[in-house]
Amino acid sequence: MRLLLLGANGQVGFELLRALAPLGDVTATTRGGVLPGGGACERADLDAPATLPALLDRAMPRVIVNAAAYTAVDRAEDEPEAAMRANGEAPGVLGRWAARHGALVVHYSTDYVFDGSAARPYREDDPPGPLGAYGRSKWAGEQALRASGADHLILRTAWVYAARGHNFLRTMLRLAGERERLAVVDDQHGAPTSARLIAAATAAALARWLDWDAPRRRAALGTHHLVASGRTTWCDFARAIFAQAAAAGVIARAPRVEAIPTRAYPTQARRPAWSVLDTTRLRETFGLHLPEWRDDLTQVVGELA
Ligand SMILES: NC(=O)C1=CN([C@@H]2O[C@H](COP(=O)(O)OP(=O)(O)OC[C@H]3O[C@@H](n4cnc5c(N)ncnc54)[C@H](OP(=O)(O)O)[C@@H]3O)[C@@H](O)[C@H]2O)C=CC1
Ligand SMILES: Cc1cn([C@H]2C[C@H](O)[C@@H](COP(=O)(O)OP(=O)(O)O[C@H]3O[C@@H](C)C(=O)[C@@H](O)[C@H]3O)O2)c(=O)[nH]c1=O
Ligand SMILES: [Mg+2]
């Protein structure tokens, strides 16, 4: 079976390279045509969605896994059109090709499609209300993929981090070497989720899905929330990172973390105060276990030690 992976050099894409390998023959793509290790691969630029069908015609995948996205939340406020091309339009192009060829699209979306005003964990069919250009573009991409008529799994995740790439954990570890104290927002709630967990859960769900008969497959399609269990705030996440990293010898000593309200940390984009996602549908549909975010963090800190 042939799979096409877009965004193989991102946090999630990199982990998917390994996790998807047992499922079939994976064609990896990046924007620049270079893999994280330096090797060559196919190019796929989401910024030029019209170029994607030619690549798909050559690769002829049974499954398209789209881990590429415009993920710079603040920068998207200045470049909403670029965010919209990659996140909003490209998924529709992938979906229309997949619908014509009977392929499945696995696509990732975000907690930032919600406005964060809920009083309980968000379910898949709760109404969206993105607060910024990134969230709006990701919501548009979900809608375009749904409208394409392709079989699809939209996996909404949140607060993604890994031992490599651009993420909050790496920012905190860098700041630990530069500062004795930090101020981190304590009024945004969510579940930090490692790229490795996302990739492992995606591969497990996909393997099961491919094994099922048509009615069971159909019932499992659509949108699922995929995040680690439990919840925390960015401030408490920072403290957990420092405690675990200091204990593992990854940093010499933990800086002091002061809890601040969002208004004391101005950013270009507004972020939801409540990003907690209900994962019941994913867990029950695919029989998956999602570890607590602290245990997930321990795995990633272990990679750095
Ligand atoms: N990061 C997070 O906290 C969260 C992410 N998500 C979603 O999860 C998915 C994976 O995110 P994550 O792994 O964190 O992302 P990263 O920011 O780590 O990686 C994004 C990847 O997309 C690629 N990319 C960006 N623009 C283009 C383009 N125009 N054409 C081709 N490739 C492009 C990047 O390539 P290059 O290196 O060349 O720029 C990079 O490989 C995305 O759909 C994202 O929206 C959801 C919730 C939280
Ligand atoms: C570095 C830093 C950040 N913060 C705050 C800002 C922000 O509210 C929060 C997290 O900052 P970041 O810039 O890492 O977060 P952000 O880029 O908004 O992360 C988001 O990325 C996109 C792609 C998603 O889809 C979301 O799920 C989410 O993970 O921490 C502090 O309070 N103090 C600090 O020193
Ligand atoms: Mg960021």
Image: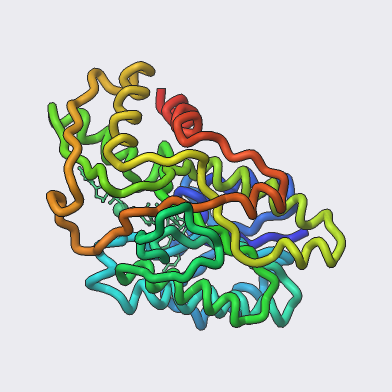
On the image, the x and y values in percent for residue 43 come to 51, 66
Residue 114 sits above or below residue 265 on the image: below
Can you give x and y, in whole percent of width and height, for residue 89 in the image?
A: 47, 79
Residue at 33%, 79% (x, y): give it: 81
Display colour scheme? rainbow
Picture mark count: 0
Task: Say which quadrant the N terminus sits in.
Answer: bottom right
Q: Examine the image and state in which quarter residue 256 appears.
A: top left
Q: Nearer the viewer, residue 120 or 40?
A: 120
Q: Nearer the viewer, residue 23 or 223?
A: 223
Residue 74 appears in the picture as rendered: yes
In the image, farthest residue toward the right:
213
The quadrant of the picture occupied by the C terminus is top left
Q: Which x, y percent locates residue 212?
A: 84, 57
Q: Foreground residue, 292 or 32?
A: 292
Would you identify the image quadrant in which residue 245 lies?
A: top left
Viewed as shown, does residue 232 lie left or right of 228? left
Nearest to the observer: residue 86 or residue 52: 86
User: Residue 157 placed where, x, y %?
Assistant: 49, 54
Q: Is the residue 160 above or below the residue 209 in the image?
A: above
Which residue is depicted at the point 40% across and 47% down? 190
Whether residue 9 appears in this view of the structure is no
Q: Residue at x 32, y 58 (%)?
A: 272
Q: Is residue 146 above or below residue 237?
A: below
Q: Residue at x 28, y 22 (%)?
A: 251
User: Is residue 135 found left or right of 59 in the rendered image?
Assistant: left
Q: Quadrant of residue 150?
A: bottom right
